[in-house]
Image (spheres, grey):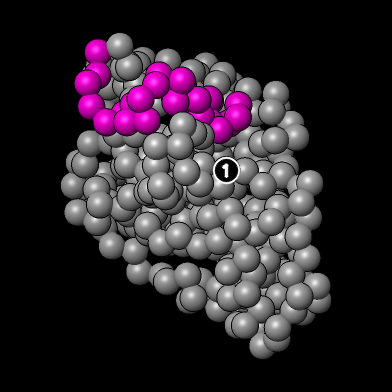
Amino acid sequence: MPTALVTGAAGFVGRHFTHALDEAGYDVTAFDINPRGLPGVRLLDARAFFSANSEHYDLVVHLAAVVGGRAKIEGEPLSLAVDLEIDASLFQWALRTKPKRVIYYSSSAAYPVAYQQPHGADGTLDRPYPLREDDLNLNPYTADHDAFRLGSQRHVIPDMTYGWAKLTGEMLAQHAEAEGVRVHVFRPFSGYGEDQSSDYPFPSFADRARRRDDPFTVWGDGTQVRDWIHISDVVAATLSAVDHDVPGPANLCTGRPTPFNDLAQMFAAAAGYTPELKHILDAPKGVAYRVGDPTKMLAFYTPKITLEEGIDRALKAGPWPS
């Protein structure tokens, strides 16, 4: 029986991965610093585990991290810096124990913020565009491609400390690969699902629509655009990429741009009412346009859950306990 390790197993993504690997016949070791009473999930700190453990695993799914919604990213940036230590501990452990494969989740937040503005930071673009894997260049001093297609090396700045941590994690993954550890790097965009915490916008919108809130609250002016992908597609795409030994990094996205105003209206329509939208202009809102180019992903996986189906599932499922 193949063995798998899932860190951060009680979190949103971790729960789904643990279930999928169990269903696939893996002998799963799962831990989390807050196991939430979930069966089979041990209470462990990732850094303590990596410093003491010497076991070999066939597959490692690394999800242990300090995470949160936009309010945490913008309001508590230093709290996310611990992710650097967690990721460094993972890769140091992997160099010692040589797991067969490591899945490292980066983020779309690692992409340069300048590429996610309405008209490009220097005005050379007349419209936003989907983010490609090569828009994030880990070797800027030797590369000669479109990674700097806006014409300046200042366009490498990611989204807040969370984006910096993920960018650094990708660099560590690259070094681990050079040392003989097979690392698959993924950049998920706006993942969502029925069992996601209301710290995130999708479940928050579902809660508001379920309550039939009128007015319906939207942070910012609602024109900010995101690329929504269901958690079942995130997990399935990741495992398909590993099965096909797809080299990373790879976007996990649909390529479908959806403004927050549209998402709110879609939720309200699915709930059967037409509320007024109330914009909280001083609330954290993030970048203007974050949509991925799914071309690479579509070579090994096609998303199955449409946004409309995801909205319907979320409304029927009811609120997820915090």
Residue occupying the far top of the picture: 141
Q: Amino acid at mark 1?
A: Val
Task: Say which quadrant the C terminus sits in.
Answer: bottom right
Which is more toward the observer, 15 or 27?
15
Q: Residue at point 66% right, 36% down? A: 73
Compared to 307, does 110 lie above or below?
A: above
Q: Residues within 10 Å of mark 1 (few under 14, many from 20)?
A: some
Residue 315 position by quadrant:
bottom right
Give the residues drawn in magenta, as a range.
Answer: 142-168
Which is more toward the observer, 281 or 36?
281
Under circle 1, the secondary element is loop
Q: Residue at point 42% right, 50% down? A: 127
Horizontal side, residue 101 vs residue 152: left or right: left
Which is more toward the observer, 92 or 260?
260
Q: Is residue 267 magenta?
A: no
Horizontal side, residue 76 vs residue 20: left or right: right
| Residue 187 screen position, x and y as percent | 41, 41
Q: Residue at point 42% right, 71% down? A: 306
| Residue 56 screen position, x and y as percent | 34, 27
Tag 1 residue: 287
Q: Is residue 150 magenta?
A: yes
| Residue 50 screen position, x and y as percent | 50, 22
Q: Is residue 103 visible?
A: no
Which is more toward the observer, 137 or 76?
137
| Residue 63 screen position, x and y as percent | 50, 38
Q: Is residue 129 visible?
A: yes
Horizontal side, residue 140 vs residue 277: left or right: left
Q: Residue at point 51% right, 55% down? A: 226
